[in-house]
Image (tube, helix red, strand yellow):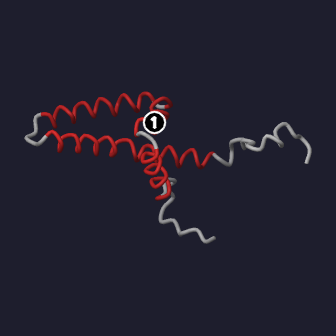
């Protein structure tokens, strides 16, 4: 299979964003974000502080509650989805270095071929 030519040395691909967006559609947004928040608590605190500041600014804006809620949601996605994609890409790069998990119970513990 031909791999598309990369335009840069970036590790995040379109597939990472597709994967993250699919996970968000399958699960609750909080379930997708929680593991990264647990691994990176300082990141989560920083985003929460910035989100609080933006929310305070939005509260003073003349707009409907529905519009305000939609903007808050988009701000959260703008904050977390790129970080989730970066985390996904980073972990994908480590796949070759991590031990493979055995999913076949018949081969577990089998040391000969």
Indicate left or right for 104 with 89 as reference: right
User: What is the x, y in percent for residue 46?
Assistant: 35, 31
Q: Residue furthest right?
A: 112
Q: Which residue appears at 32% of the width and 40% of the height?
A: 76
Camera-nearest residue between 88 and 65: 65
Residue under the image location 58 percent in, 48 percent down:
92
Query: Measuring 84% from the left and 36% from the top, which residue is drawn there?
Result: 109
Residue picked out by circle 1:
31
Quarter of the figure with residue 67 = top left
Position in image of residue 71 (x %, y %): 22, 44
Q: Is residue 60 left or right of residue 96?
A: left
Instruction: Examine the image and state in which quarter residue 63 appears.
Output: top left
Residue 102 x, y percent position in the rendering: 75, 42
Q: Quadrant of residue 44?
A: top left
Check the image and name the residue furthest to the left: 62
Assign a secondary structure to mark 1.
helix
Specify few, some or many for label 1: CA neighbours under 10 Å numbering under 14, 14-19, or 20 or more: few
Nearest to the observer: residue 10 or residue 32:
32
């Amino acid at each position: 299979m031909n791999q598309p030519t990369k335009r840069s040395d970036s590790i995040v691909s379109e597939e990472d964003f597709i994967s993250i967006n699919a996970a968000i559609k399958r699960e609750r947004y909080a379930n997708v974000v929680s593991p990264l928040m647990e691994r990176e608590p300082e990141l989560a605190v920083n985003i929460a502080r910035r989100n609080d500041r933006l929310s305070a600014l939005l509260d003073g804006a003349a707009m409907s509650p529905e519009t305000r809620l939609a903007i808050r949601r988009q701000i959260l996605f703008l904050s977390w989805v790129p970080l989730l994609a970066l985390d996904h890409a980073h972990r994908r790069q480590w796949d070759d270095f991590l031990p493979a998990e055995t999913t076949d119970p018949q081969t577990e513990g089998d040391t000969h071929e």
